[in-house]
Image (cartoon, rainbow, N blue to C red):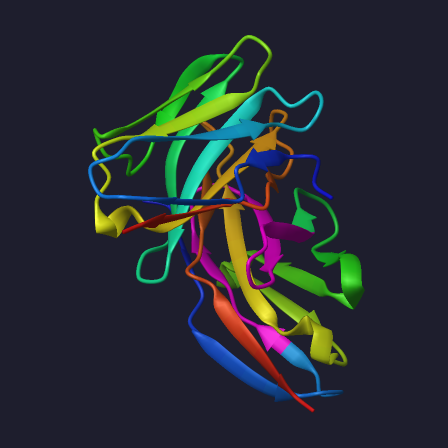
Amino acid sequence: DSGVTQTPKHLITATGQRVTLRCSPRSGDLSVYWYQQSLDQGLQFLIQYYNGEERAKGNILERFSAQQFPDLHSELNLSSLELGDSALYFCASTNSDSPLHFGNGTRLTVT
Amino acid sequence: AQSVTQPDIHITVSEGASLELRCNYSYGATPYLFWYVQSPGQGLQLLLKYFSGDTLVQGIKGFEAEFKRSQSSFNLRKPSVHWSDAAEYFCAVGTTSGTYKYIFGTGTGLKVLA
């Protein structure tokens, strides 16, 4: 158990809809990373937060947004969903330069 | 630009055989290096990490990796593979300057034959 909790585990929704994925980092970790994993794109870095502030952006679409709250949990919001957004979404947390610890992911299916 | 290359998309080995998964990186300084394993439907689990010091690092589940600066490599090895090792393996680099980033390779899928 990595200590990183992601909810929900599975999400099925229709095109055009909006969903929110939630992540609780390991106790003591200030930094949260979001990744998207799909069969054809591999593990793609989306965005990083550190202690509530956005630190780095990767290949995140404008339709996607995220935030980290004062209690350090993070949410990834995906809107105007398209079929191609179907993927596994992972959250990972770390403290400074320690390794990333991953949650078990949220599997999003857009129909 | 920093990058990580895992040249083998898939590898098949027999149970009990030795294993080596290749990883090459491109980074101007000494990076932090990691290997992760992902079982189907699961998150990525850290196998081992290299930050500094001894270039041969031991990890969980009997895995080890060797950092070779001259070859920009961090290959993962296991002397005797078990059927339960079948999974996807990811090499990753952690950059140590500027905004701290983690760069992942595309993964190597391991199949183990009984």
Q: Please give left or right for residue B16 compared with residue B98 in the image.
A: right
- Image quarter for residue B17? bottom right
Name above or below for residue A36 compared with residue A53. below
Residue A10 in view: yes
Query: In this orientation, which residue lies closer to the viewer: B20 or A27?
Result: A27
Q: Residue furthest top?
A: A70
Query: In this orientation, which residue lies closer to the viewer: B31 or A19?
Result: A19
Q: Please give left or right for residue B112 compared with residue B61 in the image.
A: left
- Image quarter for residue A3? top right
At 48% from the left edge and 32% from the top edge, which residue is drawn?
Answer: A33
Residue A47 falls inside the magenta stretch: no
x and y percentages locating residue B71 in the rendered image:
50, 63
At 74% from the left edge and 56% from the top edge, which residue is drawn?
Answer: B57
x and y percentages locating residue B19 in the rendered image:
65, 79
**Residues drawn in magenta:** B20-47
- Image quarter for residue B37? bottom right
Q: Please give left or right for residue A51 compared with residue B55 in the image.
A: left
At 51% from the left edge and 47% from the top edge, which residue is drawn?
Answer: B93
x and y percentages locating residue B3 in the rendered image:
38, 51
